[in-house]
Image (cartoon, rainbow, N blue to C red):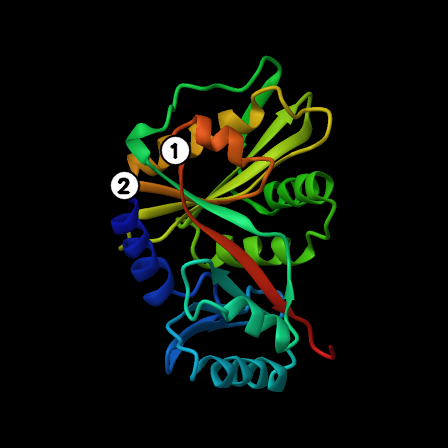
Amino acid sequence: MDQDAVRALYDEQLRREARPDGPGATVERVGDVVRQTGPAHAWNGVLWSRLEAHTADRAIREQLEHYTALGLGFEWKHYDHDGPADLAARLAAAGLTAEEPETLLVAETGGVGTAARPPEGVELHPVTDPAGVELVARVHAEAFGTDASDLRRRMLDRLAAHPGTTAAVVALAGGRPVSSARLELTPGTAFAGLWGGGTVPGWRGRGVYRALVAHRARIAAEQGYRYLQVDATGMSRPILERLGFVRLATTTPYVHTPGR
């Protein structure tokens, strides 16, 4: 894989030319910044920027003013190849808070093993209705220890408006949801996104996550997507690298909450 070429394609298709990721959201380019604005439960933030030292502070201030005027929190999704070199420090100085960095990993769909199956006693079920969404939200809350209310609403929105663009799956063991994940398909691009893969404590290390990756890779291949991309945590990165994923960048969410 030519990692520089794939990184440039990723930046073009999923950042600079990004499309709204759900109903009620809009993506616009304002100067040298591309941002998404939507309802409070949607993802709001900066997807891409092309800034220089003399333009960065003004651009950051303009995004703060934009989202603050709407009463929205937002995320500036910073990649380590974005300019200027001190952009992260400028975001922090403006009052945005850095969360845990993640690694942008990419693999060619045909190069990811798709034969992995879930361990004995575990069945994979597609998520096609609100009851399935509720199972995903339960896994998310237990696996990551975070509130899943916004995720639940976003999934319900997309299920109603664009049912063919998200392929979510939940793993059940004895009827209990123990793992879940999403595959987001972006028409007109080369990339299918792996999101939200999480397994509850007690079921980790048994091959469930690997089976969910294989399941989604099969779907992406059937739909004609060349690449799989994922923002990997430190927990999932080693598994994905063993499956053939390679690093394109480190990405850090810089977040701003209204009133802070």
Q: Quarter holding the N terminus?
A: top left
Place of residue 226 in the rendered image (x, y in percent of width and height, measured from the top left): 27, 41
Alpha-carbon neighbours of circle 2 within 10 Å: few (<14), some, or many (≥20)?
some
Mark 2 residue type: Arg
Q: Quarter holding the C terminus?
A: bottom right
Place of residue 150 in the rendered image (x, y in percent of width and height, measured from the top left): 64, 58
- Left or right: where 245 falls relative to 40: left
- Mark 1 highlights which residue? 217
As drawn, the label of residue 122 is: none
Mark 1 residue type: Ala
Place of residue 243 in the rendered image (x, y in percent of width and height, measured from the top left): 42, 27
* Residue at figure coordinates x 55%, y 84% from the top left: 61
Q: Is residue 102 above or below residue 214?
A: below
Q: Secondary structure at mark 1?
A: helix
Q: Is residue 58 above or below residue 102?
A: below
Front residue of 155 and 109: 109
Q: Is residue 59 above or below residue 104?
A: below
* Residue at figure coordinates x 63%, y 27% from the top left: 172
Place of residue 8 in the rendered image (x, y in percent of width and height, measured from the top left): 29, 56
Q: Is residue 39 visible?
A: no
Q: Earlier in the sequence, mark 1 or mark 2?
A: 1
Front residue of 45 and 122: 45
- Left or right: where 171 falls relative to 224: right
* Residue at figure coordinates x 41%, y 59% from the top left: 81
Where on the picture, by quarter, is residue 234? top right
Q: Is residue 98 visible?
A: yes
Front residue of 235 and 188: 235
- Mark 2 highlights which residue? 226
* Residue at figure coordinates x 72%, y 30% from the top left: 201
Alpha-carbon neighbours of circle 1 within 10 Å: few (<14), some, or many (≥20)?
many
